[in-house]
Image: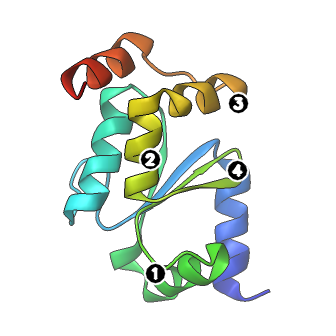
């Protein structure tokens, strides 16, 4: 396992919800990262952000690790969930709520409902 892969493995094992993104949760550096971080922040999810722009090894390593070509990438309880389009779809369908419920991730259900109402 490469150094990047072992660091990624440790991060996703030690933190229930991890978002590999461009920028940080308080200052995203691309629209797609901003959308996913915005959803998680709005829903009150306590998540760890990893800024891939700060570490080229992790930036490429996360793509190799997940076999997924784009960033952001969301992990819940060590499992890869998806990128921006998948997280957006899951949020609007309620699947993200279900995933969080099944994994004991705390979030604001009312906020999740408000996102769906605003996009319905």
Q: Which residue is mark 1?
A: 59
Q: CA distance from mark 1 to mark 3?
A: 26 Å
Mark in front: 1 vs 3: 3
Residue 24 spot, x, y in % from top left: 31, 57
- On the image, which quarter does residue 118 sit in? top left
Q: Is residue 57 above or below residue 105?
A: below
Q: Which residue is mark 4?
A: 14
Q: Secondary structure at mark 2?
A: helix
Residue 116 spot, x, y in % from top left: 31, 23
Mark in front: 1 vs 2: 2
Residue 92 as seen in the image, left or right of residue 106: left
Assess disc 1: are there few (<14), some (14-19) or many (≥20) residues with their C-alpha within 10 Å of its C-alpha: many
Q: CA distance from mark 1 to mark 4?
A: 19 Å
Q: Residue at x 73, y 53 (%)?
A: 13
Q: Secondary structure at mark 1?
A: helix
First reached walking from the N terminus: tag 2 or tag 3: 2
In terms of depth relative to the viewer, which is nearer, 116 or 22? Answer: 116
Mark in front: 3 vs 4: 3
């Amino acid at each position: 396992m490469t150094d990047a892969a072992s660091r990624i493995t440790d991060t996703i094992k030690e933190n229930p919800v991890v978002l590999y993104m461009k920028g940080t949760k308080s200052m995203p550096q691309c629209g797609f990262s901003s959308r996913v971080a915005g959803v998680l922040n709005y829903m009150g999810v306590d998540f760890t952000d990893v800024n891939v722009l700060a570490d080229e090894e992790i930036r490429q390593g996360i793509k190799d690790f997940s076999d997924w070509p784009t960033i952001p990438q969301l992990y819940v309880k060590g499992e890869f969930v998806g990128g921006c389009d998948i997280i957006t779809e899951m949020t609007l369908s309620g699947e993200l709520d279900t995933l969080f419920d099944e994994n004991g991730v705390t979030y604001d259900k009312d906020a999740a409902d408000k996102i769906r109402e605003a996009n319905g």
